[in-house]
Amino acid sequence: MTPSSRERALAAELFLTWLVHDLEEALTMAATSRRLATRLRGSPSPTARRAAERVEVSTVEAATAIALMGVLVAFATERGRRSAGGDPLYQYVLAGLQGHVLTHLAASCWLGGYSTGVLTAVTVLLPHTRRARQSLRSTGTLIKGPVPYVRGALLLLPATFACQGLARALQRRSRRRVDSATD
């Protein structure tokens, strides 16, 4: 396999890796969000108690948000595939997803056990992102230093909140339609 074909394959695999990881998240996010909300409600901080209402998500809401984020990941993956891994957006998403593993580990530590997505973050997402970045490094196309991680976080964090907000708004709209249809 030539270096460029290896990079194209690794870029295409990123979406599949993300899909496996986010399938676990879609199946478990509602339960983890309930545990997190319960913990926040018991906090002495009024801010934490107010946040509890925004943290809890349904399975449908989680799946919708994940599907919306999938559009961004698929777009970045395709750019990475076409550029044999050299596209900056692809590299930012790749580094951002590698950094995302830390959020899963932190959540599991804070909850004192399993949190949504932690199994595949460690066993699927982390190995793939490390392998893809190492391959980019070996071909000289890796953007070095902290820039990809910083830009990846600056891209994925707001995108996550936007996808979650849109998913919540769509679910509320759907509930209003159902409620008005039954009246």
Image: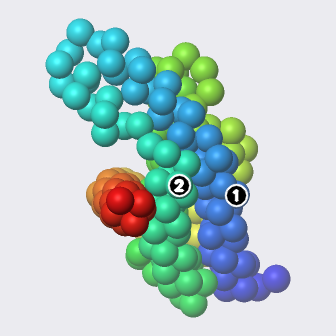
For the image, the number of numbered tags is 2
Secondary structure under tag 1 reads helix
Residue visible at 42% across and 60% down in the picture: 182
- Left or right: residue 45 compared with residue 138: left
Image coords of residue 11 (percent x, y): 63, 75
In this orientation, does residue 58 appear? Answer: yes
Secondary structure under tag 2 reads helix
Residue position marked by numbered label 1 in the rendering: 20
Image coords of residue 127 (percent x, y): 69, 51
Res 60 label: 2
Taking the view exactly as shown, the residue that stands out farthest to the right is 1
Taking the view exactly as shown, the residue that stands out farthest to the left is 46
Q: How is the image coloured?
A: rainbow
Q: Which one is nearer the viewer's eye here, 155 or 114?
A: 114
Residue visible at 34% across and 12% down in the picture: 42
Assess whether mark 2 and mark 1 are in contact (beta carbons under 8 angstroms).
no
Density class for disc 2 (Cα within 10 Å; few <14, some 14-19, many ≥20) is some
Taking the view exactly as shown, the residue that stands out farthest to the front is 183
Residue visible at 23% across and 9% down in the picture: 44
Q: Amino acid at mark 1?
A: Val
